[in-house]
Image (tube, grey):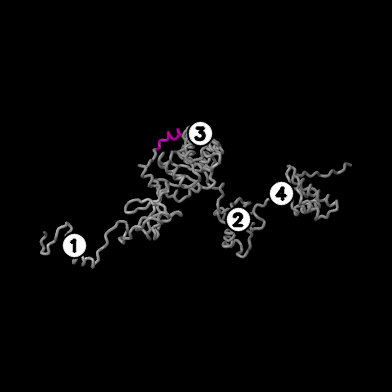
Amino acid sequence: MMPKTKAIVRLDAESLFRFEVVSMVRILQTQGMTRSKAVTETAGSLHRCNDGGLRQVSKRSVYRWLAAFERDHIAGLQNMQRPAVATSKVLPPALAGFIEAQKNEDPHASIPELIRRAQEFKIIDPHQSISRSTVWRLCGRLNLSTRQRPHKHEADTRRFAHAHRMTVVLCDGKHFRVGPKRHKRVALTFLDDATRYGIHVVVGTSEAAQIFLQGLYETIRRVGYTDFYYLDHGPGFISTNTATVIANLPHTHLIHGKAKYPAGHGKIEKFNQTLLHDVLRSLDGAPDVDSDCGSLTLRLQHYLTRVYNVRQHESLEGESPAQRWGNDKRPLRFPEDDDELRLYFETTEQRKVTNDHVIRFDGTQYEAPRGRARQSITVYRNVLTDELSVLHRGERVRLQAVDLHRNATDRRASVVNNGDGDDLKPPPKTAATLAFERDCGPVVDDDGGFTDPQGQNT
C-alpha cells in the first residue's frame, strides 16, 4: 500500500518572506530568548526580500504571522485576498443606492453633505451615526469621485492650434545663467501660436512686469496687435500694470492659463527646451560671453530670426515658421503711429500732495508743482520708462525726485497769496492806499504830462 503524500503548498514571494521572519523568531526562541524579546529583535532587524531589497516589519505583523503559522502551518502564511464587496456590508442598501444616485447627479457633493441629505430624505435616522470613512470606501467601490474639485487629469484639457497668425501670442520666461560669474538672467520670448513664429525675445535680470511690457511694446511695433495674449502666472504676467496695458490695447484680450496645463503651454515650453539646448547651455560659465542684458537680447534675437524661424518643423508639415507666417494671408493690425502706441503704455493713479508739495509713489518722494498742496491729482506713469508726470496748467510736467540737500540751501520764492502762486501779481490796493493816492498822488500822469488844477493840461 502506497503511503499518502502530503499536499504541496505553492507559496508566492510574500509568503516565503513571512516564513523566513517566522523562522527567525523560532530560532531565537530555541536559543533561550523569550517570545516577546525574540519578536522585538526580529522586528528591529532588516530582512532581505527575494528581489534583493531590505525590508522592516512591525511587531504586530510578526505576532500575527506567528499565530497564523501555529494555527495552519505554512498555509497560514499565504497572502489571502479578501473577497471583493460590491457595495458595503455595513451601510444599509437603501443608503448605498441613495449615495450612488446623488453622486451621479451632483459629483461635487461632499461626503458629509451626502449624509445630511440622507437624513433630510429620511433614508437614515437623523440621530444615526454614519462613518464618513465607510461612505468614502463605498464611493471608491462604485467608482464615484470623492473630490469636490476635479483633478487635473479629469479636466477638459485639450491641445489647440489656431488657424491664422496673430490670433494668440504665447509668452513665457526661461531662466538661465551666463558668463564666468554665472549671472542669473531670464529670456522672455513672444511666440505666435498658429505658425510657431518667434516674434521677439527680450532678456532681463528677473521676470518683472517692466521687462515684459518693454518686449510687448517692441512686439507690437514689429507685427502689430494680436487678439489674445496667453500667459502663465509669472510675477511679470500677473502684474496690475500688465493687465492695464493689455486692456487698453484695441481689440486685445489677456488670458492666464491654468497652472500645470501642458496642453496650453506646450508650444512655448517646447520652444524653451529648444532654446536651452541650442543656445543657453553654451552660455553658462562661458568666459567670452557678455552678461549684459542688451548683449544677450541681441544674441537671442539673432538665433530667433536667423536660426529658429528658418528651420523646418515637423509639426508644421516640413515648413519653417517663417514660411508659415509669410503664407498666412491674414492682415496685420498696426498702430497709426508711435505716439498712439505709447499712450497705451501709460497708467494713471490718484495721489494726494502733502503740505510741502511732495507726492509719494512706490516709496519714492517726488516734487509737485507749487500751488497743489493738499490736492488730489492724477499721476501719469509711463510703464516703459517708469517716468511720472502730472497735468499742470494744460501741460505735462515730469516729476523729479526730491533733492533734500538742494532744498536745504535753495532760496525760497516769495509767498504771494494769489491762488496758484506761480505768476507774481501786484498786491491789491486797500482803501487807505486809494485815499492817499487821491490826496497825495503824483502831479504828472502816466504819460508824463502835468495836470492843471483848473482842468487844462500844459
Is 384 rendered above or below residue 35?
above
Residue 369 in sight here: yes
Q: Foreground: 219 or 458?
A: 458
Mark 2 closeness class: few <14, some 14–19, many ≥20 residues within 10 Å = few
Q: CA distance from mark 2 to mark 1?
A: 113 Å
Q: Is residue 280 above or below residue 18?
A: above
Residue nearest the observer in this picture, 365 or 53:
365
**Residue 280 among those drawn in magenta:** no
The image quarter in which residue 372 lies = bottom left
Q: Which residue is mark 2?
A: 97
Amino acid beneath label 3? His
Mark 2 vs mark 1: in front: 1
Tell me the residue that label 3 is attached to. Answer: 313
Q: Which residues are magenta?
A: 322-330
Q: In the shown orientation, is residue 44 left or right of residue 332?
A: right
Where disc 1 sits, the SS reads: loop
Q: Please name which of the two marks, 3 or 2, marks the residue nearer to the observer.
A: 3
Q: Position of residue 242 (x, y in %)?
A: 45, 48
23 with respect to 133 (left or right): right
Kindly indicate whether the residue at mark 2 contacts the one at mark 3 (C-beta within 8 angstroms). no
First in sequence, mark 4 or 1: give its number. Answer: 4
According to the picture, the residue beneath numbered tag 1 turns out to be 442
Residue closest to the far right: 1
The location of residue 246, given as percent across then percent down, is 42, 47
What is the quadrant of the N terminus in the image? top right
Name the residue at 37% across, 47% down. 343
Rounded to the nearest angstrom, the CA distance separating label 3 from label 2 is 55 Å
Dot 4 crowding, Cα within 10 Å, few <14, some 14–19, many 20+:
few
Q: In the rendered image, which residue does mark 4 sit on? A: 81
Amino acid at dot 4: Gln
Query: At which x and y percent is residue 63?
Result: 77, 54
